[in-house]
Image: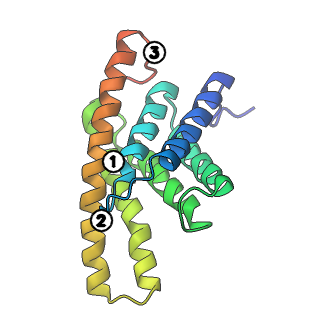
C-alpha cells in the first residue's frame, strides 16, 4: 500500500472545520470595504492555521478546494463556479511554495506562502480582466495593485496565524517544526 497523502480522522475533520469556518466567516462578514484583497486576511489565517494543526503537505490545498465547494453549494460570494478558483488557487499556491521553503523558520515560511497565494489570487483577477477585453497594460497594473493589496491583508492574517501557532506550540498542539 502506498503512503501518499493520508490523513487520519482528526486531521480530516479539522480540515473540514477550517474550510467551513472560512466560508461561514466570509458569508457573515460580507465587508464592502471597496479594497481589493481583504478576503486574503481570512484565507491566509485559516489556511495557515490548518497547515499548523494538521502538519501535512496538501492539507492547505484540500482545505481550499473544500472551501470552494462549500461556497459554491451555499452561494457565498459572487462568480458562480469561479468561486471554486477563488478559494482553491491561493491554497494550491501556498502548498507549492511550501515545497520550496519547508525548512525555513515559520515566520518566513508564512510570509513567502502568503506572497505566493496573493500572486495566485490576483492571477484570477488578471485573467478575468483579460477575458473582459481590458488592455494588457491596464490589466497588468491592476494585477500588481491586487498582489500588493492581497499580500498586505494576507500578511496580517499570517501574523494572526503565527500568534495562534505560538499558543498551540505552548500546549504541544503544533504538528510542524518551527
Contact check, label 3 and label 1, Cβ < 8 Å:
no
Quarter residue 111 falls in? top left
Residue 80 placement (x, y as % from top left): 61, 67
The vertical placement of 154 against 163, above or below, is: below
Question: Which residue was labeled with disc 3?
Answer: 173
In this view, 48 is above or below 125:
above
State the residue at coordinates (43%, 28%).
52
Spatial separation of the CA atoms under disc 2 and disc 1: 13 Å
- Circle number at residue 146: 2
Mark 3 or mark 1: name the one nearer the start of the chain: 1
Quick one: SS at disc 3?
loop
Disc 3 from disc 2: Cα separation: 35 Å
Q: Nearer the viewer, residue 163 or 33?
A: 33
Q: Give the number of the mark in front: 2 or 1.
A: 2
Question: How many discs mark residues in the rendered view?
Answer: 3
Badge 3: how crowded within 10 Å, few (<14), some, or many (20+)? some
Residue 115, image x, y percentages: 30, 52
Q: Callout 1 environment at 10 Å: few (<14), some (14 to 19), or many (20+)?
A: many
Answer above or below: position of 121 versus 161.
below
Which residue is label 1 attached to?
A: 114
Local crowd size for mark 2, using a 10 Å CA cut-off: few (<14), some (14–19), many (≥20): many
Q: How is the image coloured?
A: rainbow
Marks 3 & 2, CB-CB < 8 Å contact: no
Helix, strand or loop status at disc 1? helix
Amino acid at each position: 500500500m502506498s503512503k501518499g497523502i493520508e490523513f487520519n480522522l482528526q486531521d480530516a475533520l479539522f480540515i473540514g472545520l477550517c474550510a467551513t469556518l472560512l466560508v461561514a466567516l466570509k458569508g457573515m462578514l460580507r465587508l464592502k470595504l471597496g479594497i481589493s484583497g481583504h478576503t486574503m486576511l481570512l484565507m491566509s489565517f485559516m489556511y495557515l492555521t490548518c497547515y499548523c494543526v494538521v502538519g501535512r503537505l496538501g492539507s492547505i490545498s484540500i482545505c481550499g478546494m473544500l472551501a470552494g465547494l462549500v461556497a459554491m453549494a451555499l452561494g457565498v460570494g459572487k462568480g458562480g463556479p469561479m468561486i471554486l478558483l477563488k478559494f482553491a488557487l491561493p491554497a494550491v499556491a501556498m502548498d507549492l511554495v511550501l515545497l520550496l521553503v519547508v525548512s525555513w523558520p515559520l515566520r518566513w515560511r508564512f510570509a513567502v506562502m502568503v506572497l505566493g497565494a496573493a500572486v495566485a489570487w490576483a492571477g484570477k483577477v488578471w485573467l478575468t480582466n483579460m477575458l473582459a477585453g481590458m488592455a494588457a497594460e491596464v490589466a497588468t497594473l491592476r494585477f500588481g495593485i491586487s498582489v500588493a493589496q492581497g499580500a498586505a491583508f494576507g500578511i496580517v492574517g499570517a501574523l494572526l496565524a503565527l500568534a495562534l501557532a505560538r499558543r498551540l506550540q505552548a500546549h504541544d498542539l503544533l504538528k510542524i517544526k518551527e
